[in-house]
DNA sequence: ATTGATTCAGTTGTGCACAATATACTTCTA
DNA sequence: TAGAAGTATATTGTGCACAACTGAATCAAT
């Protein structure tokens, strides 16, 4: 149940249009636009690695956790097999990973980094720094943004159970 | 040029892994996950209106601005014609909008709301409130989140020119 | 008026994101 | 241990998001 004490919008000035169906008042639209712009900004950097942003995210996890399953990867990235299976096939096609089978459980795919995948990590190391240069926003604000995004994510994700 | 004084990550604790290629340290991943979760949370609400989230956004603009062009709509939604043309055809297919031509300039499409589109606004009015109920996050935090998202968006969007 | 650049919308192709479903394998339980 | 229930991955279909490109209309500036 909800107290319905307030509507789902947020604008800074009280003078502005207070219509809840106005785009300017919607947090979600700002979130959506910022996320799109962010992926767009990554593109030229990741093109040099021949990776998309979701592929880059998958590689980040696999560089840290060798031999995990599709399920575990999906839990970490908050993505399902419908998204990951074709993405992982593309990474396999580029020779960056291998998609083996677990010996203990024939259902699970075990994901391994190839030597080429490993060596790509060197080029990827500079990406966070280059990306940081694109955003003039102070670091403290970015920390705050991350905290708020994580908060909203958990509010929306926990509710599923 | 960039001062490269800091890398593009942000974690709260100093004890944690400070690897810039760690998922836990990336603002962008939090932003990306929160945006995905948000669209997912809208889905059951918008299913009742037979709209997707981007379609809902387009309708929000068209309810407020009758007779605008695809270009103007794209400027407001930060989307291009490659995304909007098929989306608008789907809205037209549902009978919610009409896609006319400008008399002054034969290149531009003029978008109008149909009576059915207009009447859908009534049902849409409750969506922001229902959505607000899904997020326990205090309003003040959401205002802050919106401000930060808008800031990041402009940092990334202005750079294009 | 002619041409050269610009603008608007549309098309094509790729790659997510996800719902719904399928299939194969595993585990639980009677 | 046979069948039921559960789990892991894969498949199919829809709808974005965007890059790259096309074609038509308009504008600029002679």
Image: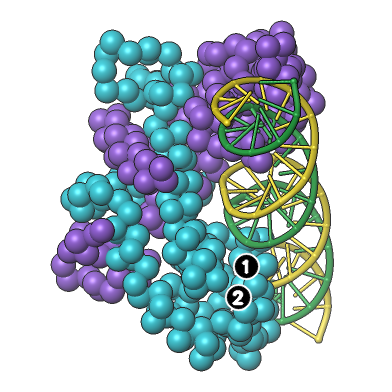
Chain colours: A purple, B cyan, C yellow, D green
The lab-note entry on whether marks 1 and 2 share a chain reads: yes
Question: Real-space Cα distance between discs 1 and 2?
Answer: 6 Å
- Residue at 36% x, 20% y is B6
Residue wearing tag 2 = B91
Chain hosting mark 1: B
Marks 1 and 2 in Cβ contact (< 8 Å): yes
Badge 2 marks a residue whose secondary structure is helix
Residue at image mark 1 = B87
- Whether residue B155 can be seen here: no
Depth order, front residue of A67/B57: A67
Classify D15 as above or below C30. Answer: below
Could one spot residue B121 in this view of the protein? yes
Which residue corresponds to the image point at 60% horizontal and 11% vertical from the top-left?
Answer: A66
Q: Tell me the crowding category of disc 1: few under 14, some 14 to 19, or many 20 or more residues within 10 angstroms, Cα based.
A: some
Q: Nearer the viewer, residue D14 or B74?
A: D14
Residue A106: numbered disc: none
Observer-nearest of B27 and A137: B27
Quarter of the rendering containing residue B110: bottom right
- Compared across the picture, whether A74 is left or right of D9 comes to left
* Residue A16 in the image: above or below residue B65: above
Residue at 58% x, 72% y: name it: B70
- In the image, residue A22 sits, relative to residue A98, either above or below, namely below
**Residue at 51% across / 30% down in the picture?**
A75
Q: Is residue A2 left or right of residue B44?
A: left
């Amino acid at each position: 149940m909800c107290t319905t004490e307030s509507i789902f919008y947020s604008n800074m000035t009280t003078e502005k249009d207070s219509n809840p169906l106005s785009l300017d008042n919607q947090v979600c639209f700002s979130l959506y636009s910022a996320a799109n712009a962010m992926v767009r900004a990554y593109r030229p950097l990741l093109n040099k690695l021949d990776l998309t942003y979701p592929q880059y995210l998958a590689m980040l996890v696999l560089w840290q956790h060798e031999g995990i399953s599709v399920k575990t990867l999906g839990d970490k990235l908050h993505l399902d097999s419908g998204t990951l299976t074709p993405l992982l096939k593309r990474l396999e096609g580029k020779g960056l990973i291998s998609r083996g089978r677990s010996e203990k459980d024939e259902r699970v795919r075990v994901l391994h980094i190839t030597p080429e995948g490993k060596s790509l990590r060197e080029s990827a190391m500079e990406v966070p720094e280059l990306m940081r240069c694109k955003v003039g926003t102070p670091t403290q604000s970015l920390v705050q943004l991350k905290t708020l995004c994580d908060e909203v994510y958990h509010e929306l994700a926990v509710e599923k159970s």
